[in-house]
Image (cartoon, grey):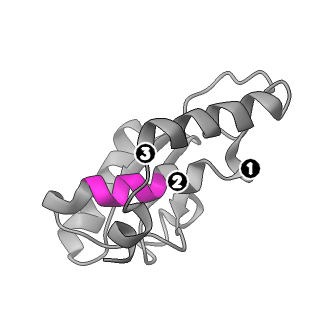
Amino acid sequence: KELADRLDGLDPRAAGTKASVAAASAGPVSKRHHLCIFVPSSARLQRYVDAAEAAWRSWGTNETFFVSPSRLSRLLDAQTWQLDTDMDTDYAHLPVRTYLWLEALGRPEWLTAC
């Protein structure tokens, strides 16, 4: 509900333009040679934690981050991103969760991170 209230009346095309202008005016972005991967994760059920650990073991890199509102496991501690606005959702509401990540990734501290 809070997210819907925040977005009510906003024109996403205008918001995107402002973000592009702000990023462009921030100066040159450092050279990056990697791609960060963000994996929606949850500790609600042990099988979700097991799946995240299996993903880490099979294809995870230092640029792979498991996004979870709570701790997943000791194995994933260094790669878990606990975002202050994240919410544990079902699959049907994953787009809302993803929007919140993108909003957070637009913060200045992430501009040159990934």
Identify the residue shown where x is 44% and y is 68%: 6
- Find residue 108 and report its horizontal and vertical position in percent: 74, 50
- Find residue 10 and report its horizontal and vertical position in percent: 43, 53
Residue 96 in the magenta stretch? The answer is: yes
Q: Main secondary structure of the magenta part?
A: helix
State the extent of the magenta-drawn residues as a range. Answer: 95-101
Q: What amino acid type is highlighted by mark number 1?
A: Pro
Q: Label 3: which residue?
A: 11
Q: Residues within 10 Å of mark 3 (few under 14, many from 20)?
A: few
Query: Are discs 2 and 3 less than 8 Å apart at CB?
Result: no
88 or 23: nearer the eye? 23
Q: Label 2: which residue?
A: 103
Give residue 45's quadrant in the image. bottom left
Query: Which numbered tag is attached to residue 108?
Result: 1
Left or right side of 63 for 11: left
Give residue 4's quadrant in the image. bottom left
Residue 37 in the magenta stretch? The answer is: no
Q: Quadrant of the C terminus?
A: top right
Left or right side of 50 for 25: right
Q: What amino acid type is highlighted by mark number 2?
A: Glu
Upstream in the sequence, badge 2 or badge 3?
A: 3
The Cα atoms of the two marked residues, 3 and 1, are separated by: 22 Å
The Cα atoms of the two marked residues, 2 and 3, are separated by: 15 Å
The Cα atoms of the two marked residues, 2 and 1, are separated by: 11 Å
Count of all numbered marks drawn on residues in the image? 3
Q: Quadrant of the N terminus?
A: bottom left
Badge nearest the viewer, 3 or 1: 3
